[in-house]
Amino acid sequence: MSYTLATLMQQRAALCARMSWLGLTILCFAWEAWLAPLRPGGSWMILKALPLLLLAHRVWLAEVRALQWALLLAPFYFAEGAVRLFEPAPARWCALLELVCGGIFYISTVVYLRPLKRAASAQRRRDTSA
């Protein structure tokens, strides 16, 4: 019974991770293209969406290695949102959304990966003791 609950929790966490990664990707692109670019007409800051796009397919498939790499990237987007939260109104709302998407992605990915990492380390312990 607890196994199915853990699996259900992992499925929900994976879904949250996918949706927040997609939201973060779309937000980063739209923010610097139309919503509140640093310079009128857009800026090179639009390239911040490139790492998100490169990992998007693998994150969508919930591949463990890709999620680990994405976890390394997420704090940078979270930090940018925290810094740009103090800008004027349109950028402030984009920064708030970036904080929300980055935070949800980070937490849900950790929730998804934790049982997998525990199972892998338990398997390693069994392999070395045998």
Image: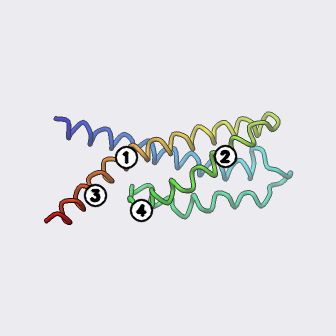
Q: Amino acid at mark 2?
A: Ala
Above or below, 77 relative to 124: above
Q: Secondary structure at mark 1?
A: helix
Q: Amino acid at mark 4?
A: Arg
| Pointer 2 or 1: first along the chain | 2
> For the residue labelled by badge 3, is the local secondary structure a helix, a strand or a loop?
helix
Q: How many neighbours does mark 4 have within 10 angstroms: few (below 14), some (14-19), or many (20 or more)?
A: few
First in sequence: mark 1 vs mark 4: 4
Q: Residue at x 28, y 57 (%)?
A: 121
Eye-nearest disc, 3 or 1: 3
Q: Amino acid at mark 1?
A: Tyr
Q: Quadrant of residue 53?
A: bottom right
Circles 3 and 2: CB atoms closer than 8 Å: no
Image coloring type: rainbow
Give the residue at mark 3.
120
What residue occupies the far right of the structure in this picture? 40
Residue identified by numbered label 2: 79
Mark 3 burial class by Cα count in 10 Å: few <14, some 14-19, many 20+:
few
Provide the residue designation for mark 1.
Answer: 112
Closest to the camera, between mark 3 and mark 2, is: 3
Q: Nearer the viewer, mark 4 or mark 3?
A: 3
- Marks 1 and 4 sit apart, C-alpha to C-alpha, by 13 Å
Residue type at mark 3 is Ala
Which class describes the residues within 10 Å of circle 2: few (<14), some (14-19), or many (20+)? some
Quarter of the figure with residue 9: top left
Q: Residue at x 67, y 36 (%)?
A: 96
